[in-house]
C-alpha cells in the first residue's frame, strides 16, 4: 500500500503545470501572447475531474502561493477568453471544450473559503458569475429559465443539470463570505436545481424535455456517447448533489432505503453488460465505476445515511481491486491526478466529498502511519492502531487525544497540525457518527 500511495502522490503533483516562459509570457485562450505580472501562469486544467479531490489535495500539500497562481491563471484566462468565461478544460492556455460544467468555480471558491488569498476576490467572483450566466454554453440559458437543462435542446442534460447546481452552490458560499448577499441568494436557489432533475417516482436523476416531462424510454444502466449523461448513467449521476446529500436521503425515503440503493449499485450483476463502446468505463464494481469520476464520492455516501461502517467496507473493496503498483495499476485514465488524489485522501482516512464545505468525510485509513508536512510549517499525522486485513473497521477516532465522534474533520483542524488516531477492529461499530448532527454537511437537514 505504501508503494501505491507514493506513486499516487507523485502523479497528483504533476499538474497543473507552469505554462509561461521565463519572462512570464504565455499564450492565452484568445491565441494572443500575454504576460503574467506578479504570478506564474499555470495551465493544463482537467477541471471536470480535478475539482473533486486533486485541487483540494493541493491546498493541503502545496504552498498557498501555488494555489494563488492557479486561481490567478484561471481568472486571467476568463479575462482573455473570447467568451468571457473561465476555463472548462484548458491545455497550455488554450480551451479544448472537453467535458461539461464550469468547474473552475469550485476550485476558486474552495481556495478562497480556505483562506488562500493573493488574488482579487471581487474579480474572481465576477468571473465565476459570468461563467455561470453565459447562456450559449451548455444549455445555460435554458437552465436559468427552466431550472434544468432540457434534453431536447442539449445532450447530456441530466448530468449538466446536477453539475451546474453544485457549481452554483460554491458560488453562493464564496459570495456569502464576501458579504454579497444578492449573489449568494441567487445561487443558493440555483443550487437546489438538482431536484428538478430528480424523478421522485423512480428515484433517479433523469433527463427532462422542455415540456417538463422526463424523457422516455429510460434505462438506468444505459451508457451511450451524447446521451442523457456524461460518461456514465443514472446509477452514477443519481448521487451527484454533494451540496445536499441530506436532501437526497430524504428524497429516497430515509436512511435504510438509501443504504439499500447504495448496496444495489455495488452489488449489481454487470456480467451481461457491454460497455466496450463507451468512453472511460472501467473499474466496474457492479454499477460503481471507479475508472471514471462521477462515482468517486459514492462509497462515502453511506456516512450520509448513518452507516459509516458500510463506507469502510466499500473503501476496502475499491482499494483492493482498483489500485496496484504495476503498469496496469489504475482502473482508468489518471485524469491529471484525480484518480491518484482519491487514493491519497482515502489512504489517509478522509475525503473531500463537497469541496467548498471545508469538511472531509472520514472513511478509514489504509496505512498505519503517515505525516503531512503542511505548507504552514506544521505537521499533521494519521495513525491507525491495529490496522490489518483482520481489523478493517474503525472502532474509535481521536483528534489530538480527544474523541472525535462526528463523521468528518475540518480543513482548519488539519491545517492546525496534530494527530488523527484511528483504532481499528474486527467488527463494525454501528453507533459511531450515525446521528444526524454528526453527519457531514448538507444544504437541507437530514431526516430524523
Image (tube, rainbow, N blue to C red):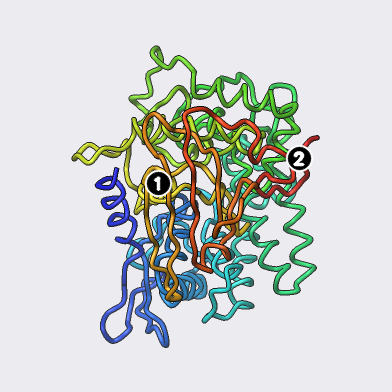
Q: Mark 2 points at which residue?
A: 446
Q: Give neighbour class at mark 2: few <14, some 14-19, many 20+ (Cα, 10 Å).
A: many
Residue situated furthest top in the rendering: 272
- In terms of secondary structure, where does tag 2 sit? loop
Give the x, y percent position of residue 127.
Answer: 59, 70
Q: Mark 1 points at which residue?
A: 347
Residue drawn at x 42%, y 17% as measured from the top left: 270
Q: In this view, does 272 lie above or below 292?
A: above
Q: Distance between the residues labelled 1 and 2?
A: 28 Å
Residue 256 image-quadrant placement: top right
Q: Which mark is residue 407?
A: none
Give the x, y percent position of residue 374.
Answer: 42, 69
- In terms of secondary structure, where does tag 1 sit? helix
Q: Give neighbour class at mark 1: few <14, some 14-19, many 20+ (Cα, 10 Å).
A: many
Q: Quadrant of the N terminus?
A: top left
Q: In this view, does 416 lie above or below 443?
A: below
Q: Which of marks 1 and 2 is in front?
A: 1
Give the x, y percent position of residue 104.
Answer: 51, 61
Of labels 1 and 2, earlier in sequence is 1
Residue 155 image-quadrant placement: top right
Q: Nearer the viewer, residue 55 or 235?
A: 55
123 left or right of 382 in image: right
Residue drawn at x 52%, y 62% as measured from the top left: 414
Amino acid at each position: 500500500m505504501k508503494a501505491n500511495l507514493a506513486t499516487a502522490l507523485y502523479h497528483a503533483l504533476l499538474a497543473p503545470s507552469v505554462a509561461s516562459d521565463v519572462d512570464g509570457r504565455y499564450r492565452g485562450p484568445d491565441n494572443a501572447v500575454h504576460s503574467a505580472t506578479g504570478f506564474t501562469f499555470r495551465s493544463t486544467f482537467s477541471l471536470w475531474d480535478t475539482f473533486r479531490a486533486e485541487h483540494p489535495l493541493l491546498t493541503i500539500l502545496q504552498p498557498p502561493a501555488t494555489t494563488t497562481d492557479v486561481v490567478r491563471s484561471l481568472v486571467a484566462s476568463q479575462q482573455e477568453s473570447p467568451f468571457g468565461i473561465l476555463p472548462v478544460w484548458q491545455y497550455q492556455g488554450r480551451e479544448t471544450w472537453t467535458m461539461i460544467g464550469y468547474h473552475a468555480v469550485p476550485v476558486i471558491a474552495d481556495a478562497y473559503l480556505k483562506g488562500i488569498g493573493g488574488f482579487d476576490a471581487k474579480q474572481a467572483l465576477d468571473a465565476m458569475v459570468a461563467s455561470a450566466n453565459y447562456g450559449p454554453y451548455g444549455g445555460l440559458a435554458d437552465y436559468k429559465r427552466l431550472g434544468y437543462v432540457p434534453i431536447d435542446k442539449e445532450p447530456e442534460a441530466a448530468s449538466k443539470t446536477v453539475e451546474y447546481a453544485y457549481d452554483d452552490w460554491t458560488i453562493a458560499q464564496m459570495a456569502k463570505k464576501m458579504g454579497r448577499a444578492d449573489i449568494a441568494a441567487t445561487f443558493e436557489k440555483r443550487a437546489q436545481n438538482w431536484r428538478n432533475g430528480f424523478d421522485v417516482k423512480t428515484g433517479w436523476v433523469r433527463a427532462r424535455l422542455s415540456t417538463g416531462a422526463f424523457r422516455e424510454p429510460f434505462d438506468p444502466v444505459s451508457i451511450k456517447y451524447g446521451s442523457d449523461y456524461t460518461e456514465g448513467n443514472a446509477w452514477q449521476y443519481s448521487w451527484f448533489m454533494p451540496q445536499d446529500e441530506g436532501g437526497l436521503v430524504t428524497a429516497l425515503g430515509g436512511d435504510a432505503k438509501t443504504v439499500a440503493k447504495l448496496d444495489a449499485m455495488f452489488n449489481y450483476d454487470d456480467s451481461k453488460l457491454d460497455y466496450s463502446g463507451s468512453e472511460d468505463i472501467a473499474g466496474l464494481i457492479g454499477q460503481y465505476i471507479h475508472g471514471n469520476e462521477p462515482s468517486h464520492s459514492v462509497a462515502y455516501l453511506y456516512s450520509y445515511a448513518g452507516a459509516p461502517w458500510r463506507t469502510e467496507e466499500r473503501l476496502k473493496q475499491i482499494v483492493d481491486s482498483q489500485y496496484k503498483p504495476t503498469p496496469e495499476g489504475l482502473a482508468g485514465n489518471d485524469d491529471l491526478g484525480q484518480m491518484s488524489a482519491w487514493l491519497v485522501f482515502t489512504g489517509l482516512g478522509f475525503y473531500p466529498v463537497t469541496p467548498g464545505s471545508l469538511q472531509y468525510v472520514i472513511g478509514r485509513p489504509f496505512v498505519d502511519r503517515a505525516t503531512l508536512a503542511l505548507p504552514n510549517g506544521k505537521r499533521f499525522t494519521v495513525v491507525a492502531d491495529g490496522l490489518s486485513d483482520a481489523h478493517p473497521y474503525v472502532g474509535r477516532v481521536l483528534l489530538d487525544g480527544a474523541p472525535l465522534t462526528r463523521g468528518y474533520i475540518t480543513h482548519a483542524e488539519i491545517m492546525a497540525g496534530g494527530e488523527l488516531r484511528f483504532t481499528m477492529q474486527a467488527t463494525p461499530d454501528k453507533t459511531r457518527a450515525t446521528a444526524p448532527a454528526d453527519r457531514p454537511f448538507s444544504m437541507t437537514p437530514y431526516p430524523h
